[in-house]
Amino acid sequence: MTECAVCWTNGIFQWTSVCAILAFVIVGLSITFLLGIGNFALHSAVLKSGHPLLQQMSGFIHLLGGRLSLVAEFLVLVVAMLLVANGWGALAWVYAGYSTLNGISAWLILSRKI
């Protein structure tokens, strides 16, 4: 077994496994962050659309001109990124599913299909 300058190899951890774990976390965080940017853009577009459906929503949507719902979206993104950074890599896929549902609903609202 060879030793590297960054970590000791004691038969369990090797440099390649550390690099693989870091790459997995970085890719998961990058995907989650980019999907979060898309979610914010879609959320803002829906809020600015003036769709009649928004008038039927609860008061939570209208607080602070819709900014409170953007804060909720931000909290969802932060929690997802924290969990992905702490080894819950599959949560990036869950967040991708959440983003897909957001995209479909935003498309339906913005194209006035609903």
Image (spheres, grey):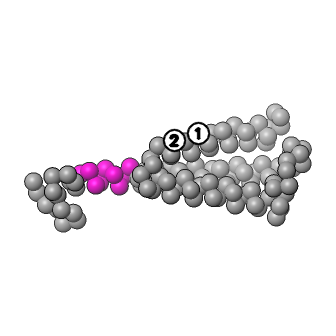
Q: Which mark is residue 76?
A: none
Q: Is residue 21 magenta?
A: yes
Q: Is residue 92 above or below residue 86?
A: above
Q: Which mark is residue 93?
A: 2
Residue type pointed to by label 1 = Gly
Q: As drawn, is 84 to the left or to the right of 40?
A: left
Q: Residue at x 18, y 66 (%)?
A: 5
Residue 37 visible in image: no
The answer to which image quadrant residue 9 occupies is bottom left
Residue type pointed to by label 2 = Trp
The percent coordinates of residue 29 (x first, y second) are 48, 54
Q: Residue at x 79, y 42 (%)?
A: 110
**Number of residues whose C-alpha sits closer than 10 Å to that of mark 2, classed few (under 14), some (14–19) or many (20 or more):** some
Q: Is residue 61 magenta?
A: no
The percent coordinates of residue 20 (x first, y second) are 31, 50
Q: Residue at x 70, y 61 (%)?
A: 71
- Along the line of sight, the residue nearer the viewer: 36 or 10: 10
- Residue that sits furthest to the left in the current view: 1
Cα–Cα gap, marks 2 and 1:
6 Å
Residue 6 visible in image: yes
Start-end of magenta stretch: 16-24
| Quadrant in the picture for the C terminus | top right
Q: Residue at x 50, y 46 (%)?
A: 92
Labels 2 & 1 near each other (Cβ < 8 A): yes
Q: Which residue is mark 1?
A: 97
